[in-house]
Image (spheres, rainbow, N blue to C red):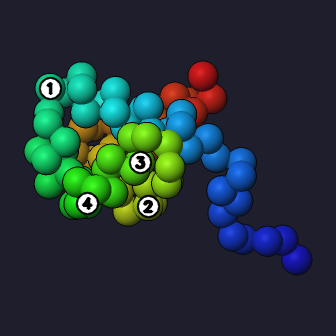
Amino acid sequence: MGNNKLNNNKLDKKKIGKIVENIRNSNELTKKEFSNLCDINILKLNLIEKGIVLPTLKMIIILCNVFKISSESFLVYLEK
């Protein structure tokens, strides 16, 4: 039986945080505007952008939908 839990050690929190920050900045949004669009509070966004916590899957899906980014493209950014 495989372990279906997401392994946080395999995900680069800082890299994901930078991707989120780059998306926000390239769309010229304040943290408040971005957090409202992605349905998260601004404190959580700060922690994500600093690479302290991972965004939820829900937040990534919302981010991809709002900014017209395919989930495949988001994953490609992680590989760079």
Residue 56 is labelled as: 2
Indicate whether 67 appears above or below 80: below
* SS under mark 4: loop
Residue that numbered label 4 is attached to: 40
Answer whether labels 3 and 1 touch (C-beta < 8 Å).
no
* SS under mark 1: loop
Answer whether labels 3 and 4 touch (C-beta < 8 Å).
yes
Mark nearer the N terminus (2 vs 1): 1
The residue sitting at 18% across, 27% down in the picture is 27
Query: Which of the two discs, 3 and 1, sits closer to the camera?
Result: 3
3D distance between C-alphas at marks 3 and 4: 11 Å
3D distance between C-alphas at marks 3 and 1: 18 Å
Residue that numbered label 3 is attached to: 48
Crowd class of label 3 (few under 14; some 14 to 19; many from 20; radius 10 Å):
many
Given the image, on which type of amino acid does mark 3 rest? Ile
Residue farthest to the right, as pictured: 1
Given the image, on which type of amino acid does mark 1 rest? Glu
Given the image, on which type of amino acid does mark 2 rest? Thr
Query: Which of the two discs, 3 and 2, sits closer to the camera?
Result: 3
Crowd class of label 1 (few under 14; some 14 to 19; many from 20; radius 10 Å):
few
3D distance between C-alphas at marks 2 and 1: 23 Å
3D distance between C-alphas at marks 3 and 2: 10 Å
The residue sitting at 41% across, 48% down in the picture is 48
Residue that numbered label 1 is attached to: 28
Mark nearer the N terminus (3 vs 2): 3
Given the image, on which type of amino acid does mark 4 rest? Ile
Indicate whether 64 appears above or below 26: below
Answer whether labels 4 and 2 touch (C-beta < 8 Å).
yes
Mark nearer the N terminus (4 vs 1): 1
